Amino acid sequence: MKYDYLGVGSGLFGSIFAYEANKRGKKVLVIDKRPNVGGNIYTENIDGINVHKYGAHIFHTSNKEVWDYINQFAEFNRYTNSPVARYKNELYNLPFNLNTFSKMFNLVTLQDIEKKLDEERKEGLAKLNGREPQNLEEQAISLVGTTVYEKLIKGYTEKQWGMSCKELPVSIIKRLPVRMVFDNNYFNNKYQGIPIGGYTQIIEKMLDGIEVKLNCDFFENRSELQNIAEKIVFTGSIDQYYDYKFGYLEYRSVRFETEELDVDNYQGNAVINYTDKEVPYTRVIEHKHFEQGKELGNEVTEGPSVGKTIISREYSDKWDSTKEPYYPINNERNNTLYEKYKALADKDSNIIFGGRLGQYKYYDMDKVIEEALKCVKNEIK
Ligand code: FAD
Ligand code: UDP
């Protein structure tokens, strides 16, 4: 065999595996069907602004080992994600915290807010009658009550996932903190930031000295690639690898409309979520704020902050096999189906499935790093 490993996909999982295997003396070929490395964390410098081409990526973790690992490849800034939610012409801080509730109910004290939230939750909790919430709607109402659910969750979630909140798993909304303090930090993690200079440098450093073929789809070159290496590390969709033989797993796709504008500062924040169902996009990202936000308004007269900005409107899109799968939809139907594919994979000693699509899990970057490092450790003694 020509290689020890064929890495299908140059995203975070595939690149970490390749880097670690190469370090241990293994010969690796990495292919990717896209024209660029990095998968969904790819950033491109356009006119001095690092544009997150496949959606805004904020690194966050509580795992020190993961934080130290990623910091080998780039210096991180102290960016704290604090998205703003816009519901029609009202603005609210996220995640759900005292700033959100105080504005929503026009209340000032913690005691009054607590009392109001108890009232807001009452009807939902009565419906549960002591049982655990079974779907996203029930979970959301039991956490934040009806008004916050109606204004900040229902419209956004149904646009994002293309289905009713009653059909979605509770796990999705559990990603967001609910805090009874004035704190707009979106994440509870100990470490958070954006790599200064973007994410692509991280992947490029990982893949330095490794053979990489871009614009190369595994399925279009399957006969040639299937036996080119002792083992395949596959980070594409697991159901596609097995020709969808048990049926299709469902995904959600995303479409980005990116525009350069001749203003210093378009929206005053990196992320604004549009939570009503009438606005067709879910969020607008203004990329410069991830790395240059603090300069704005501080009389900076030169450099990339001056005179222009780049924004992306993010539209959630129904997935079919001609579109990029971005989000696994981890409901019961899909998780059960995934287990069938996983059972097949477990019997095949020539392939490892990794990452968001290979493991069909709504992983953030930190979890992907943990999984990739665990995988290398098991694989190469
Ligand atoms: P991917 O990045 O999807 O890489 C898989 C690669 O495999 C791709 O490059 C693809 O082209 C390639 N591939 C697939 N099939 C084939 C094939 N047949 N042949 C060849 N190549 C193939 N995480 C965070 O921690 N913080 C965030 O703020 C955050 N924001 C996100 C926003 C959006 C819109 C999305 C979609 C995800 C976000 N994530 C975030 C999650 C993050 O993107 C993932 O955890 C991480 O990028 C997954 O890495 P991966 O290697 O598993 O997959
Ligand atoms: N969510 C919401 N309103 C918001 C932001 C998020 O209802 O303004 C819900 C929505 O269901 C979303 C989930 O919370 O899918 C998780 O949000 P997160 O920001 O983690 O989504 P991601 O960045 O992964 O798309």
Image (cartoon, rainbow, N blue to C red):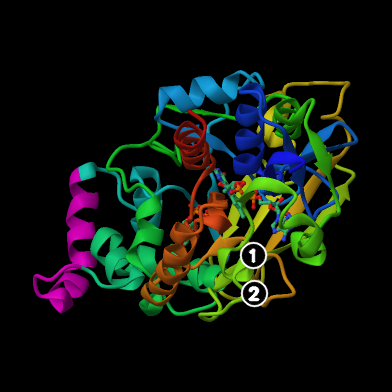
The residue at which mark 1 appears reads as 325
Labels 2 & 1 near each other (Cβ < 8 A): yes
User: Which residue shows up at 51% across the image and 45% down it?
Assistant: 364
Q: Label 2 is placed on what type of residue?
A: Trp
Query: Sequence-wise, which precedes: disc 2 or disc 1?
Result: 2
User: Which residue shows up at 42% across the image and 71% down it?
Assistant: 340
Quadrant of the rendered image containing residue 190: top left
User: Which residue shows up at 52% across the image and 38% down it?
Assistant: 372
> 114 or 212, which lies in front?
212
The residue at which mark 2 appears reads as 319
Q: Quadrant of the N terminus?
A: top right
Magenta segment:
111-132
Q: Main secondary structure of the magenta part?
A: helix
Q: Label 1 is placed on what type of residue?
A: Pro
> 140 or 20, which lies in front?
20
Quadrant of the rendered image containing residue 105: bottom left
**Compared with residue 194, is residue 13 higher up or lower down, i.e. above or below?**
below
Image label count: 2
**Compared with residue 119, is residue 304 higher up or lower down, i.e. above or below?**
above
Residue 121, magenta (yes or no) = yes
